[in-house]
Image (tube, rainbow, N blue to C red):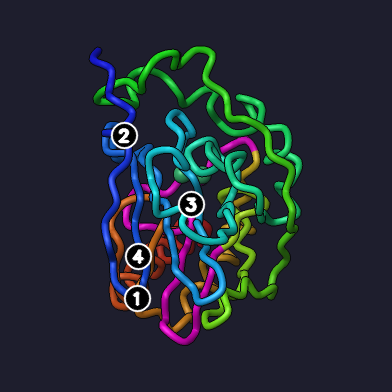
């Protein structure tokens, strides 16, 4: 398989409300993480940081322009690969240990990362069989109800366990923007990892259903609005209720 050039690895897409999507087009869609950059008055946030196979700070100037907090929606390999490049790192306390010591098993790199998840391989010296995320001690531990404050913008932490124990969504009430991570997006949801929990997952989905969202920016796949948000969660809940009835 061909190798990509580092300057081609990342793609940025402006989404409105000073939100920019950063993603890695050479990773196949199912494994391709959405990284969300949000500009604030006093500081910016980056929700998730990709696989870490090419330096984000070197190749995406947007993330070095201003003070920035790298938030982890959760600690699977596709979401925290470049967190170690940032001085300010926030994660839910239930996954702080994984961020600090991201083994291949804990981050799901084992078993998911193989050459098959790429359309074009990352630059050398990348190898799928030895790929691992670099560890990064959190500088802020997040809990449900905490506020991530950008000066003029305020994101509430909603703890959304189920996909993983320390999953969070970030909710900006003023704009109706929800960064949902991997608990819900417009694609096949993953409920069977080693640290997934079905009861937690159900409760998290019920909680997110009632949010008056305008836009959901998920951990994978395209963004969507309120109607689709309700439709996705309603169908998921109906499926669970049918199997347990
Ligand atoms: Zn995940
Ligand atoms: Zn993911």
- Give the residue pinned by disc 1: 17
Quadrant, the N terminus: top left
Task: Indicate whether residue 192 is drawn in magenta.
Answer: yes
Provide residue 94's location: percent of width, then percent of height: 74, 51
Kindly report the distance in space between the C-alpha atoms of the residues bearing marks 4 and 1: 24 Å
Kindly report the distance in space between the C-alpha atoms of the residues bearing marks 4 and 2: 31 Å
Closer to viewer: mark 3 or mark 2: 3
Q: Which mark is residue 9?
A: 2
Kindly report the distance in space between the C-alpha atoms of the residues bearing marks 3 and 2: 17 Å
- Give the residue pinned by disc 4: 232
Of the numbered discs 4 and 1, the one sitting upstream in the chain is: 1
Above or below 77: residue 2: above
User: Residue 23 vs residue 190: left or right?
Assistant: left
Provide residue 209's location: percent of width, then percent of height: 46, 75
- Give the residue pinned by disc 3: 64
Closer to viewer: mark 4 or mark 1: 1
| Residue in the foreground of this view, choosing between 45 and 129 | 45
Asked whether mark 3 and ligand 2 are closer than 8 Å, the reply comes as no
- Magenta part of the chain: 169-194
The kind of secondary structure element at disc 3 is loop
């Amino acid at each position: 398989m061909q190798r990509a050039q580092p300057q081609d690895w990342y793609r940025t897409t402006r989404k409105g409300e000073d939100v920019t999507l950063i993603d890695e087009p050479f990773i196949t869609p199912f494994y391709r993480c959405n990284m969300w950059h949000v500009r604030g008055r006093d500081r910016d946030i980056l929700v998730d940081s990709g696989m870490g196979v090419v330096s984000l700070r070197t190749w995406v100037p947007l993330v070095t322009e201003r003070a920035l907090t790298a938030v982890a929606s959760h600690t699977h390999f596709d979401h925290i690969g470049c967190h170690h490049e940032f001085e300010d790192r926030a994660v839910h306390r239930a996954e702080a240990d994984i961020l600090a010591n991201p083994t291949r098993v804990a981050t799901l790199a084992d078993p998911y990362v193989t050459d098959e998840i790429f359309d074009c391989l990352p630059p050398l010296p990348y190898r799928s069989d030895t790929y691992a995320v670099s560890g990064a001690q959190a500088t802020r531990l997040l809990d449900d109800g905490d506020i991530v404050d950008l000066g003029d913008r305020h994101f509430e932490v909603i703890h959304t366990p189920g996909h993983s124990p320390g999953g969070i969504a970030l909710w900006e009430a003023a704009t109706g923007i929800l960064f949902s991570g991997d608990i819900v997006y417009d694609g096949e949801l993953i409920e069977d990892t080693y640290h997934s929990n079905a009861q937690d997952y159900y409760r998290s989905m019920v909680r997110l259903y009632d949010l008056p969202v305008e836009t959901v920016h998920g951990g994978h796949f395209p963004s969507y609005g309120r109607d689709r948000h309700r439709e996705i969660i309603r169908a998921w809940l109906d499926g669970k209720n049918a199997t347990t009835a």
